[in-house]
Amino acid sequence: MPQLPSHAHYVVIGAGIHGLSTAMHLARKLAARGKTVGPAGTRIVALDKTAIGAGASGIACGVVRNNYYQPAMRELMAHCVSVWESDPEAYSYHPVGYLQISPESMHAQVGSIYEQQKAIGYESVFIEGEAECMRYMQGLLADWQAKNITSVLHEKRGGYANNMASLAGLARKARDAGVQIIEGVEVTSLHMSGGTGHVTAVATSAGVVGCDQVVVGVGPWVNSVWQMLDLPKTVTIKGRDGKRNDGIPMWHYMALQEGTLGVDPEYQKTNDGRMPPVIHVDTDAPLYSDRDGKLITDKMWGIYYKPDFHFGGVQGGAMPAVVDRPADEVRVDPYGPKSPEFVVTDNFADMWTSALAFCQKRFEGKHGVYRKEPSGGIGCFTPDSFPVIDRFRENVYVIADSNHGYKMIGVGDLVSDELLGATSALLEPFRFSRYAEGRLHPVSNSPFPWS
Ligand SMILES: Cc1cc2nc3c(=O)[nH]c(=O)nc-3n(C[C@H](O)[C@H](O)[C@H](O)COP(=O)(O)OP(=O)(O)OC[C@H]3O[C@@H](n4cnc5c(N)ncnc54)[C@H](O)[C@@H]3O)c2cc1C
């Protein structure tokens, strides 16, 4: 049984991207203020019920991008990209760039993303018009053939990182800064003081730890910690029309669908022999099966993909599938590819490999090398599918990223500032109070809940 201290100044629940990043930044900032971090000084303990990377961060595709229609998301992501860029080696980050390739229904919105990227100094190129887009894409990848594309946003920054390698880098930095990471310890309840609900201790499978502050970064398990905090199962949202919408479930789940085509990653090199940017395509052109020619969909659809040596092929995904049941009835464990319920089906493989062939000739007839292994995982989403990053019960900081989050490595940096008394303007748009106050983020025309 792991040995726990009887008290820690900061208890971090979850050793995924957010828990580790927050702990590491907090420890470094305390040290910069002359504090000793560790058993002899300010104690930061990160607890994980399984292990570092046992949640969504450990299976994430790893795409890092700025492409968001919501100004607040874009500004936050620009900060996160700069944290990835601060130590690409330790974070196993590949700055290959990112392409958002869209149909006419998204043209104007993506154009406004480009304008606002210019305004915040985030380097990108915007191509408009069907013929121009085809020319630009074929200049990069000669076999490009996707139809109904009228804009291409090429973000020169961003790219992808290798999930477990980046977590190992973060964990190493956190430990070096004095953080104690304890694996195999599950937080089972929170002791709250009668009056304010202030959390005085964290009860775990290995004993009780008294605490001053708690940080919650539990990804898909957030509904269970939300219940420990006795927070509401439903919320009232003031709509854009000013009307109150009562009884909206706080959490719902979706299943993220991802897979790997078992080709040599070098197979997807650009015309000039480089690794290509991460490609994200949305289109309203009908999609036909590359296997049997049948119509898969005539509705808007989207995919993303990248060559990746870590996954050993061309890896990517498509729109998530709705998990159509109340959050309390969703079994999160066993998580990810070990789940008996939430792994991708043959329909996903057919759709995704056909979509690859729709985009590039080199993928035609390649569905046979799709890796038939369990993949994907579920994510827990907020009512508007944007993060809630806020303090609850006075001393509990919850980072619920609504599944935007592997790329959000910089959130821990901002949260650690707030733990030390500052207020982050970048985090302000993500407070829980936005629902009741109607401070909602704009909604895009993308088929993904994350754009
Ligand atoms: C298949 C898939 C692909 C994705 N691809 C991308 C992508 O390309 N780019 C991107 O930006 N995002 C992506 N995401 C989303 C991203 O992975 C998540 O938003 C992010 O990793 C969440 O990080 P986290 O630190 O909050 O939680 P997690 O990484 O899930 O970590 C939570 C940790 O908390 C621990 N835990 C849970 N409950 C307890 C408890 N009671 N006591 C102690 N420990 C506990 C778990 O064991 C786990 O290790 C993807 C998600 C999935 C599922």
Image: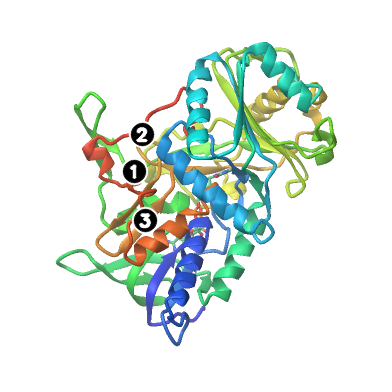
Amino acid type of the residue that numbered disc 3 sits on in the rendered structure: Val
Task: In the displayed orientation, state which residue is furthest to the left.
Answer: 195
Tell me which label, 3 or 2, sits earlier in the chain. 3
In the foreground, 269 or 353: 269
Instruction: Report whether 201 appears left or right of 97.
Output: left
Residue 288 visible within the image: no
**Which quadrant of the view contains residue 203?**
bottom left
Residue at figure coordinates x 46%, y 22% from the top left: 445
- Find residue 336 and report its horizontal and vertical position in percent: 58, 48
Tell me which label, 3 or 1, sits earlier in the chain. 3
Instruction: Report whether 416 appears left or right of 351.
Output: left
Q: Write down the residue under mark 1.
A: 429
Assess disc 3: are there few (<14), some (14-19) or many (≥20) residues with their C-alpha within 10 Å of its C-alpha: many
Tell me which label, 2 or 1, sits earlier in the chain. 1
Tag 2's secondary structure?
loop
In the foreground, 10 or 187: 10
Amino acid type of the residue that numbered disc 1 sits on in the rendered structure: Pro
Q: Which mark is residue 398?
A: 3
- Find residue 340 and report its horizontal and vertical position in percent: 57, 44
